[in-house]
């Protein structure tokens, strides 16, 4: 059985880098083992329990959503001029959310 810490670090590596599972470095163990534990822990609710536990430990002022706004080309919105009111309203809605469950 592979060490849970190595497997967890392998999962974090994939999530952090966005690399495909096949590119997982060998130091984390066999990629099938790391992937299977990731899926198994997800089905068992381990990830949800971790996130909920972390959320309970945080002060409300520390919980936030990371959001980025990318200006699209005018033609992308289908209008002759950009409608910034819609963009600002969407940003404001995101900014008001304090916590979301993954």
Image (tube, grey):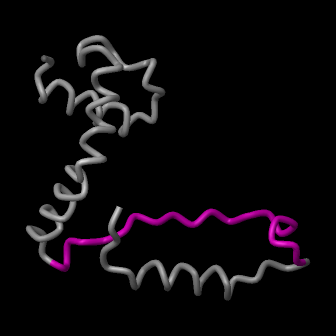
Question: Residue placed at 15% from the left, 18% from the top?
Answer: 2
Quadrant of residue 34 within the rendered picture: top left
Q: Is residue 79 above or below residue 30?
A: below
Horizontal arrangement in the rendering, residue 11 relative to residue 50 (left or right): right
* Quadrant containing the C terminus in the rendered view: bottom left
Queried whether the magenta region covers residue 59, the answer comes back as: no
Identify the residue shown where x is 91% and y is 77%: 80
Overall secondary structure of the magenta section: loop
Q: Is residue 37 left or right of residue 24?
A: left
Which residue is drawn at the image coordinates 20% and 50% (left, top)? 46
- Verify whether residue 75 appears in magenta: yes
Which residue lies most toward the right here? 80
Please state the total of marks drawn on the protein image. 0
- Give residue 92's position: percent from left, percent from top: 50, 85
Image position of 14 with respect to 73: above or below = above
Q: Give the range drawn in magenta.
A: 60-79
Residue 86 in the image, given as x and y percentages of width and height: 67, 84
Residue 1 sits in quarter: top left
Question: Does 57 sit above or below residue 79?
Answer: above
Out of 38 and 27, give the one closest to the viewer.
38
Q: Residue at x 34, y 71 (%)?
A: 100
Q: Position of residue 78 (x, y in %)?
A: 87, 73
Task: In this rendered view, identify the residue nearer to me: 33 or 90.
Answer: 33
The percent coordinates of residue 73 (x first, y second) are 80, 63
In terms of depth relative to the viewer, which is nearer, 90 or 40?
A: 40
């Amino acid at each position: 059985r592979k060490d849970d810490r190595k497997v967890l670090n392998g999962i974090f590596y994939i999530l952090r880098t966005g690399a495909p599972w096949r590119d997982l470095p060998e130091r984390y163990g066999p990629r099938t083992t790391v992937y299977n534990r990731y899926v198994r822990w997800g089905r068992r609710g381990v990830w949800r329990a971790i996130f909920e536990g972390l959320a309970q430990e945080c002060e409300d002022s520390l919980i936030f959503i990371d959001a980025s706004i990318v200006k699209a080309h005018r033609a992308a919105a289908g209008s002759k001029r950009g409608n910034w009111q819609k963009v600002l309203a969407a940003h404001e809605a995101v900014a008001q959310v304090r916590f979301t469950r993954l």
